[in-house]
Amino acid sequence: MLSSPLRTISLAPSFVALVAFGTFASASVITVPTMNGRTLGSALLSPNAQGIEIDSITIHKGVSGQFGTYSNFDLAPVTIANGIVLSSGKVNNLAPIPGASLPGYNPASPPAQVNSQMTFVGNGGTPEFDEHGLDEIENFYASFDVAAIRVDFTLDEDSQVQFDFIFGSVEFPYWTNQFTDAFAVFLDELDPGAQICFDASGAPIQVGSSFAGLETTEDKNTAFSNPHGVIHHLTTTTEELPAGPHTLWFEVGDVNDHILDSAVFLANLRTGVGDPGTEPSDECNADLNDDGWVNGADLAILLGDWGEVSDDDLDGIGVINGADLAIMLGAWGECP
């Protein structure tokens, strides 16, 4: 590809200060453990959601520490709007692992930060996760430490429903066959046929086959940074659902053992129109004019919408502000 086009923009001192603030304000992900359904519901529902209301969120399986809200997942190239997090370990331990990039770090044996047994009575799995796993997850024999929530919601009219997510695991890159941690979503019934999240090859989301096609080790926000990995920011779109009440169950769990944690970051539950299924959704969201580069032309578009509610919002909050600017600056240059 040719070199990035140059564009000169004169910036006022106040804006230069804003750039500096936006750049340095970004940090690793911030998580707040909670099992409060109202708090989880407020964080999961898109700020711009129309025609959908979350009636309740309840803990379907799991213990204190496995659920929470998150923010600051905004260091490019892997970003996602603020939302909720479910983990087979402790959500308050999901910031980058100190020393993980040093030569002496052993990815086959991550530290206690991401190596937790959460359930000491039985396996801590769910019947539907196990039934789904026996059919669809590689080398599966049991689920452990499953964190699962039930989301009851109501649609005002016949609509498709969408949500965004990132799935990460410290099982990658070493343990990708024997211990295939997984993420599953069931719509309106707890049956394998009601599982609606799939990777690019049509397989359910799991360490192993899913990571073979969609993984990146370039996340800078979480414990799943290099040498561990995440599956890229994805959006799942349902078939059109009839108006009225519906239920989603979100479940993430260890497979075949209690240790080496995985987590899913969920955001922006909303109505929306698209092809049913799961698709990558942030390959280069900062390229606002779709020319293959993140540069001055995109910055001009962002500044033109400053302070307004706009589709050019990069962090999913709804209003163009310094957080969106930080995402754009972090993605500056050629789109991946």
Image (cartoon, helix red, strand yellow):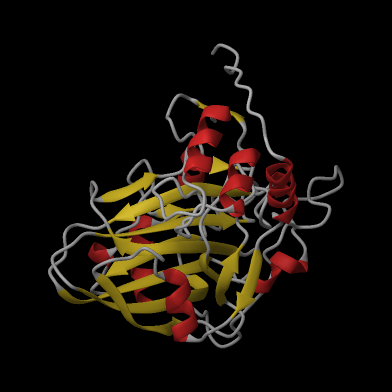
Q: Position of residue 336 (x, y in %)?
A: 54, 30
Q: Which residue is drawn at 79% across and 51% down?
A: 100
Q: In which quarter of the image is residue 329?
A: top right
Q: Residue at x 85, y 42 (%)?
A: 103
The residue nearer to you, when weighing 89 against 222, is 222
Q: Residue at x 56, y 72 (%)?
A: 69
Is residue 216 depicted above or below 190 in this figure? Answer: above
Q: In which quarter of the image is the N terminus?
A: top right
Is residue 121 depicted above or below 255 in this figure? Answer: below
Q: Where is residue 153 in the image (x, y as percent from the top left)?
A: 28, 77
The residue nearer to you, when weighing 136 against 152, is 152
On screen, residue 140 versus residue 12, left or right, reads: left
Is residue 150 depicted above or below 265 in this figure? Answer: below
Q: Where is residue 328 in the image (x, y as percent from the top left)?
A: 58, 41
The residue nearer to you, when weighing 90 against 308, is 308
Is there any visible trace of residue 277 in the rendered image? yes
Q: Quadrant of residue 29?
A: bottom right
On screen, residue 192 versus residue 209, left or right, reads: left
Q: Position of residue 50 (x, y in %)?
A: 28, 66
On screen, residue 276 versus residue 169, left or right, reads: left
